[in-house]
Image (spheres, rainbow, N blue to C red):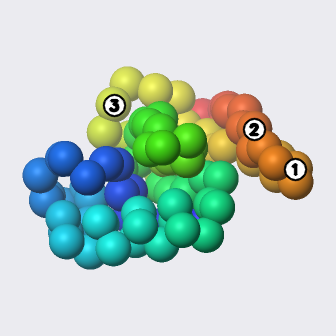
Amino acid sequence: MGHIHISNQEEESKYFNIDLMKRKEILDLFTGNHVLAYLTGHPHKLTRNEYVGIQQVSCETTNKNFVKRPFGFRLREVMPYSISHSFIHLEQ
């Protein structure tokens, strides 16, 4: 788990992801160490990407949304060879 979304190697560097060179270094570490998923929250919205079989999921927020989604959080279930997640809606 981390805070800032990595996305993919092709996306330009900007506020919501990590600098391109550092991103490549981290993704190489992930692929070299059999990482199944990288879970974040920085964008304050649901984003799902995959990079060579690695799930990349950032989640909604409990305090400020940048998109029209309900407030809430992701419940993540980690198993030996998989990770699943579901949304838990917070009533306003």
In space, the residues marked 3 and 2 are separated at their CA atoms by 23 Å
Q: Is residue 9 left or right of residue 75?
A: left
Q: Is residue 59 visible?
A: no
| Mark 2 secondary-structure assignment | strand
Check disc 2 and report the residue beneath it.
Answer: 84
Task: Mark 1 and mark 2 in contact? Answer it, CB < 8 Å.
Answer: yes
* Residue type indicated by callout 2: Ser
Check disc 1 and report the residue beneath it.
Answer: 79
Q: Callout 3: few (<14), some (14-19), or many (20+) C-alpha neighbours within 10 Å?
A: few
In this orientation, which residue lies closer to the viewer: 20 or 16?
20
In space, the residues marked 1 and 2 are separated at their CA atoms by 8 Å
Q: Is residue 2 left or right of residue 36?
A: left
Residue lying farthest to the front in this orientation: 32
* Residue type indicated by callout 1: Met
| Mark 3 secondary-structure assignment | loop
Q: Residue 33 in the image: x percent, y percent?
A: 61, 69
Check disc 3 and report the residue beneath it.
Answer: 67
Who's the residue at 56% across and 41% down the image? 53
* Residue type indicated by callout 3: Val
Number of the front mark, 3 or 1: 1
Number of the front mark, 3 or 2: 2
In this orientation, which residue lies closer to the viewer: 90 or 4?
4
Question: Does 25 appear above or below 58?
Answer: below
Who's the residue at 82% across and 48% down the image? 81
Q: Callout 2: few (<14), some (14-19), or many (20+) C-alpha neighbours within 10 Å?
A: few
Question: Does 43 appear above or below 35?
Answer: above
Q: Residue 84 in the image: x percent, y percent?
A: 75, 38
Question: Disc 3 or 1, which lies upstream in sequence?
Answer: 3
Q: Residue 4 in the image: x percent, y percent?
A: 38, 64
Who's the residue at 55% across and 47% down the image? 54
